[in-house]
Image (cartoon, coloured by chain):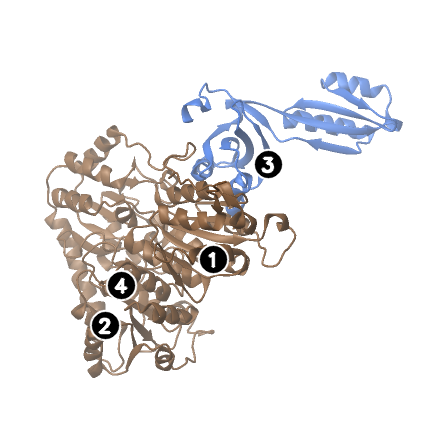
Chain colours: A blue, B brown
């Protein structure tokens, strides 16, 4: 079976230890987590965890079931990339010394922006898919990127099903 | 002013009493002392069994839970007390045994400081528990215990752990126990779809060689009668897993035997000849399936199962009947045609005859000098009552006892199945016996396993639980030795034991004892054991290098089961 990139969307109660319980399911099976974000969902007190993994369909079904088996998990959905609208954010720290007029062009081309200018450096921000933020990183290397960080994925599902019916 | 508040420690005990817990199996220590102090005033309401090791406490709680169907309760202090529970927690999870484990924890201001006897037991027990929680406030104690009992006993049962800091135990709070009946994120009983029952019934009605495999789910779901009625009507032959044993009387005409690595010949071979395989409350463990790539590939599989995560986990099924198997079976019985399968059952009987000829005869009525484990079980069968409970440890004796003990009723088989925990039997037998002093509880154990928890002879002595301990002593870690013989060129690496005088040990614990080494004395010794009213220790010295057959070697297919 072919490995594909899947996103699991987990809705949980706000319970201490829930993140550990979820990640243990991946650890035990030797599956690497490519992205992980957690935040409160639309419903107060319900948390939404977005996990990105490369795996087979067979495995993703098992993983989702094992996650749902956790007492404080309300529901786990899994999606392929084309079943979601998703976004990641990346920050690039660039020293002032290296900046020339080329930077403006790069920022315009990639729809990025400078969100902070300090005495010694500027911080460029870009949101987009991993491929896009990665591409900008490659380009910005000419300007000597001091630091780079990319968030995990945030994603909403295209199917119209919501968590309400599981509450 | 009238203060109705009580200490958290007393709330723990009152909560357990509110849940009708009959026993606490436990061991005191620093961080749980307030609860033990509170217990002192409740000895008329709940009985505490002081084991000799926390592992003994949790296995005893498991034995009690497995026989009674109730939640087993055990208690330990923080640090080493808590970590000593872990083996039992893992065992209870994989064998779906309902337990509530309560551990003391250092005071909350010391958490994370490496305080004396501090360990992160919530972290350590996380992968082994169905649910766990740390309670740091007195007002959270009763709700946590209520939630714990609900989770432990509902759906697919399992162990929960509640870790309570010492300051929560000593703080004052109101006691108002509200049982937990619903948790919005937890659906223990999936809704059965009627259309699925129709699909399953159609498959069964069209089948020429249908075959039922049943597991512990039948017992946990109280579906024994529903299973029997389904088999009576459908006429389908049925075989059991290790933990499903006893769910159907072995006298039932459709019963054809046992599955798995050391199960029966026919039931394994014919798995690969049936056309519809109906798996009920079992999880296709690798010890049942052998090589899963060559397991029942010709068959359409119907899986009756409560836990959605078991569906298609090991074996893909055609029809998944998700739900309580008692209800599923009752509905299925309505829809299946009344039939019989005499030719198909005859195929099982023919292979059974071959197994008898090649294996069983030599096991039960040997002609060689050395005693076999099988003949000991044969004599136990002769004197035991129909509702006698067999508790076994792990290894050769476990497989032999399972193969030959005559199971007549449900909840008479207690063993460590999924985890294979040596040392399980002695404390589990104590727990089983405490459920009912009038039932016979026979603890069959090997010379390896008994030494892992032998200190629990002391707990049996103190409770005077009339457990009949039958030690089958071959001075070897027999199952490992068997594998070394068959798969490692007889390189007996660290499997031979220089054993103590077990009789002297048992006598020191004031057991009535007997040791048998020759065939002529065996029957009489077993008979005497059963007439003795109190705890009894019978050591039988058996042949050193006997093997358990049939056997499906690791990685082999079920149809490659060997008779020798």
Q: Chain of mark 3?
A: A
Identify the element where label 1 is drawn. helix
Mark-to-mark CA distance, 2 and 4 = 17 Å
Mark-to-mark CA distance, 4 and 1 = 36 Å
Give the x, y percent position of residue B97: 36, 51
- Residue at the disc numbered 4: B390
Q: Say the numbered circle drawn on residue A34.
A: 3
| Furthest residue toward front | B1
* In front: label 2 or label 1: 1
Mark-to-mark CA distance, 2 and 1 = 34 Å
* In front: label 4 or label 1: 1
Q: Is residue B475 above or below residue B406?
A: below
> Do the dots labelled 3 and 1 sit on one chain?
no
Crowding near the residue tagged with mark 4, few <14, some 14–19, many ≥20 C-alpha atoms within 10 Å: many
Mark-to-mark CA distance, 3 and 4 = 49 Å
Q: Say the numbered circle drawn on residue B37.
A: 1
């Amino acid at each position: 079976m072919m490995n594909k990139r899947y996103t699991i969307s987990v809705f949980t109660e706000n319970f201490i230890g829930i993140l550990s319980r979820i990640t243990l399911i991946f650890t035990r099976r030797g599956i690497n987590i490519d992205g992980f974000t957690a935040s409160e969902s639309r419903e107060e007190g319900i948390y939404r965890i977005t996990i990105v993994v490369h795996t087979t369909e067979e495995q993703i079904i098992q993983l989702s079931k094992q996650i749902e088996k956790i007492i404080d998990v309300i529901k786990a959905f899994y999606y392929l990339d084309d079943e979601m609208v998703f976004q990641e954010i990346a920050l690039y720290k660039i020293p002032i010394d290296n900046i020339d007029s080329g930077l403006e062009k790069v920022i315009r081309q990639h729809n990025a922006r400078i969100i902070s200018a300090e005495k010694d450096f500027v911080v460029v921000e870009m949101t987009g898919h991993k491929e896009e933020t990665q591409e900008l990183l490659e380009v910005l290397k000419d300007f000597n990127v001091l630091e780079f960080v990319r968030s995990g994925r945030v994603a909403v599902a295209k199917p119209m099903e919501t968590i309400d019916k599981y509450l | 002013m009238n203060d109705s508040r009580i200490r958290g420690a007393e709330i723990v005990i009152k909560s357990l009493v509110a849940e009708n817990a009959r026993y606490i199996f436990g061991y005191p220590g620093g961080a749980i002392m307030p609860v033990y102090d509170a217990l002192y005033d409740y000895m008329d309401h709940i009985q505490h069994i002081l084991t000799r090791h926390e592992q003994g406490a949790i296995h005893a709680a498991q034995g009690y839970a497995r026989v009674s169907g109730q939640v087993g309760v055990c208690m330990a202090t923080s640090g080493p007390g808590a970590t000593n529970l872990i083996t039992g927690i893992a065992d209870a999870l994989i064998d779906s045994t309902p337990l509530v484990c309560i551990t003391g924890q250092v005071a909350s201001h010391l958490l994370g400081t490496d305080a004396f006897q501090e360990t992160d037991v919530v972290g350590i027990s996380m992968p082994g528990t169905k649910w766990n929680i740390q309670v740091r406030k007195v007002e959270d104690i009763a709700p946590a215990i209520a939630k714990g009992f609900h989770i432990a006993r509902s759906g697919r049962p399992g162990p929960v752990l509640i870790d309570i800091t010492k300051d929560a135990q000593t703080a004052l709070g109101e006691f108002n126990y509200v049982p937990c009946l619903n948790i919005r994120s937890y659906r223990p009983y999936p809704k059965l779809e009627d259309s699925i029952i129709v699909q399953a019934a159609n498959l069964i009605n069209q089948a020429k060689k249908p075959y039922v495999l049943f597991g512990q789910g039948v017992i946990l779901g109280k579906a024994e009668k529903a299973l029997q009625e389904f088999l009576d009507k459908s006429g389908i032959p049925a075989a059991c897993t290790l933990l499903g044993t006893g769910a159907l009387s072995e006298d039932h005409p459709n019963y054809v035997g046992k599955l798995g690595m050391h199960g029966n010949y026919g039931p394994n071979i014919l798995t690969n000849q049936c056309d519809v395989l109906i798996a009920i409350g079992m999880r296709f463990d690798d010890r049942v399936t052998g090589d899963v790539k060559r397991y029942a590939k010709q068959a359409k599989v119907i899986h009756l199962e409560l836990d959605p995560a078991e569906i298609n986990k090991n074996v893909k099924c055609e029809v998944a009947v998700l739900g309580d198997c008692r209800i599923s079976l009752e509905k299925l019985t309505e829809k299946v045609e009344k039939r019989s399968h005499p030719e198909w059952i005859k195929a099982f009987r023919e292979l059974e005859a071959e197994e008898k000829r090649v294996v069983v005869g030599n096991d039960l009525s040997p002609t060689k000098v050395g005693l076999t484990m099988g003949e000991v079980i044969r004599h136990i069968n002769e004197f035991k009552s129909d509702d006698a409970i067999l508790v076994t440890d792990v290894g050769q004796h476990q497989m032999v006892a399972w193969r030959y003990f005559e199971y007549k009723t449900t909840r008479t088989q207690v063993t460590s199945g999924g985890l294979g925990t040596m040392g399980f039997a002695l404390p589990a037998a104590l727990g089983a016996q405490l459920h009912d002093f009038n039932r016979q509880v026979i603890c069959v154990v090997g010379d390896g396993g008994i030494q892992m928890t032998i200190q629990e002879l002391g707990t049996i002595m103190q409770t005077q639980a009339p457990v009949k301990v039958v030690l089958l002593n071959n001075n070897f870690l027999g199952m490992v030795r068997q594998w070394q013989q068959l798969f490692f060129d007889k390189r007996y690496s660290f499997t031979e034991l220089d054993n103590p005088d077990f009789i002297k040990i048992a006598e020191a614990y004031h057991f009535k004892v007997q040791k048998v080494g020759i065939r002529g004395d065996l029957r009489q010794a077993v008979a005497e054991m059963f007439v003795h009213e109190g705890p009894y220790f019978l050591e039988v010295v058996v042949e050193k290098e006997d093997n358990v057959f049939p056997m499906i070697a690791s990685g082999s297919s079920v149809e490659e089961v060997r008779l020798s």
